[in-house]
Image: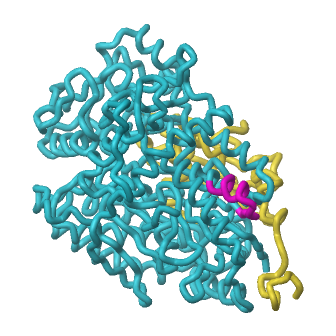
Chain colours: A cyan, B yellow
Amino acid sequence: MAHLRTDVLVVGAGGAGMYAAIAAAEAGAQVVLADKSLVGRGGATIMAQMTVAAAVGEWRPDHWTRHFADTVAAGRGLCNEELAAILCEEAPVRIREMDRWKVGWARENGRMRAVAAPGHGLPRCVYVDFLNTGPAVARTLRGRVARAAGVRRVSGLAVLDLVVHDGRVAGAAGIDLEDGAPVTIAAGAVVLAAGGLTRLFRRNSASANMGGDAYALALAAGAELVDMEFPQFFPIGHLAPRLVGMDPIMWDPFRYKLGGRLLNGRMEDFVENYGARDSGVYTAPRDITSYAIVKECEAGRASPAGGVFLSFTHIPEPALRAAFGPVIDRLAANGIDLTRRPIEVAPIAHYHMGGIRVDARMATRIEGLFAAGEAVGGANGANRLSGNAIPEAFVFGERAGRFAAEAARGGSAWRVGDAGRAADFLGAAAGRRRGGAGLGALWAELQALMWDRVGLLRNGDGLAAGRARIREMRRRDLPALAPAARRGFDPALRDWFDLRASLAAAEAVALAAAGRRESRGAHQREDYPETDPALARNQIVHQEEDGALVCRWAPVVGAAHAPAPPAAAE
Amino acid sequence: MRPERVTIRVRRGGIGEPDRIEAFDVPYREGMSALDALIWVRTHVDSTLAVRYACINANACKECTMRIDGRAGYACTARLDAAGALVEPLDNKPLIRDLVTDIVPPRERLAAHLDDSGDDRDGSGRP
């Protein structure tokens, strides 16, 4: 049977996974970097056309403690301040490292250019023109990974279960998607960098890989999740007309740079009716903007496609072209002329604040098991500040790789017989059906359920019904649809394992959302519209032996030392 | 006049099987891509249809590379019109199944990196 042995196994090869692999290799570890898709092309990073928040301080004087203060304010009292401080303090270090690696951050008169973004007290977000941040970052990291000594890149490998002995991770089992064959990997340490769970929601900005794999792997291995009730909805995801070859969240920088008007179906301004200032500039926080759009649609004032209008018709064409260059031509190829017609936008699942619970080393409570990037929970609390996702991939990825390399020095806990046992679960999961008919319908139902009942506006009845149906899908429907194990590329086999992970992640979200009887940040309850100061705590989810998920409350983690800006920065 | 439905024809088959063309009628949506149609087929008609994609429509992952009306391209950026389209696997890459071909760079293949059996007795690599 196919088998690999390594010091560090990194699951997921987006920004966080690639950074982890580079850092682990630099620390002397042998690394296997595995991805279901092509290495460096399948995660969320490459799709991020946006900006990267970091207190680099070249464009305007800045200090990481100011970035920290903005991050914690956006997080509505729930940020793990230790992780948030690490994120903000190390982000400029990683941005400069990427600069040395020639990512091509935009510059003006030699200084790294930074733009304003909602929630930031000053222009702090660096980027690569034009709307090219994610692709440039992915390309740069792919090049570094390819040159790193001791990194083996494996595309098309789905990691499906972790092997754990006595609270210590020993490796993993999965399938080679090319031929459906089982693969085992003995490892001294494992980094989960497989991203978030936005694919669970009907409207999303996700790649097909953002289905909660990292969370499901962590739960099954005995690790804990935190803040799972907080998926972030990007308020102005592209809705209509159909746009191909572009990121559906691309409208944000247009608003930063030029200002853009949000109008309801009657072409009226409305965001300010919901308590946010938005006049002329884009300053309304994401959660309030999303809420305002949903409420406006509920009130019968939606645009034809079921969202609201975003209009740039007040901006002269030369100004549009100066700001966005060739992007204007790509829009024209999509039949969109911003000087003549508004486009339609609506909230879209975009990021997950929740995730795997880790300490400052990115270590879970399972020895040797680490997490990085969006898969990590806690740093962003109840609402992520714009621009914090890519630095999180860099900073947490680098740390996870470095500390995983250290942890792997003790060797692997892999035991004789593990490969056989690990492969057995694949056989046990397989059913008698050929082809797995019905998986598509179950996928569609899960995405609709998560959108309608566990989405932007929640209530206790909807959450209870949603959770009951998810549990039924997990325990009854999914096992009944197990496709027969057969050799050769089988999309149904992948769908089935994807759905297995997604249902576990979905149940964790619904469970935590039901437990939080208040509204805070991205979690909005119609039956508990106020924020309850007593609930400035985090919910922790773990999985019992029988697969049942259990939720408990824990105090918010404070910063190890209170970050304060130096006097000179004031 | 907008069509209600559009037909996408797919060349299907696996290694060593005779290939065949199957036609699927999918609901038309203005500006839709060939990949949108294939995803609709997988969701609503036949989830065994083998097609690979990750980014869906960002033109980033390169996994949906195939022939569309005879020309190699990305299904996620190929727009469908009322005439529909014929989609086929790349003809210059080894076929895996249906629209999936082996596009993985040689140095990223599992087979290039395999170690020993996982059930070696002492972890030394010796069986």
Seen in the picture, residue A129 relative to B18 is either above or below; the reply is above
Across and down, in percent, residue A68 comes to 36, 44
Seen in the picture, residue B82 relative to A359 is either above or below; the reply is above
Instruction: Depth check: give the residue in front, A437 or A312.
Output: A312
Which image quadrant for residue B50? Answer: bottom right
Query: Is A553 displayed left or right of B107 in the figure?
Result: left
Seen in the picture, residue A214 relative to A484 is either above or below; the reply is above
Q: Residue furthest right?
A: B126
Q: Residue at x 62, y 28 (%)?
A: A104
Q: Residue at x 55, y 13 (%)?
A: A109
Across and down, in percent, residue A146 comes to 76, 48
Question: Is A373 within the magenta?
Answer: no
Quadrant (top left/top right/bottom left/bottom right) for the N terminus of chain A: bottom right
Question: Is A23 within the magenta?
Answer: yes
- Residue B53 makes an appearance in the image: no
Instruction: Depth check: give the residue in front, A179 or A423.
Output: A423
Q: Residue at x 54, y 57 (%)?
A: A209
Seen in the picture, residue A328 relative to A524 is either above or below; the reply is above
Instruction: Depth check: give the residue in front, A516 or A482.
Output: A516
Across and down, in percent, residue A456 comes to 25, 53
- Residue A96 makes an appearance in the image: yes
Quadrant (top left/top right/bottom left/bottom right) for the C terminus of chain A: top left
Across and down, in percent, residue A320 comes to 42, 15
Query: Is A197 displayed left or right of A555 in the figure?
Result: right
Tell how many labels: 0
The stretch of residues the image draws in magenta is A20-32
Query: Is B32 displayed left or right of B15 in the figure?
Result: left
Q: Residue at x 25, y 34 (%)?
A: A308
Instruction: Depth check: give the residue in front, A260 or A245.
Output: A260
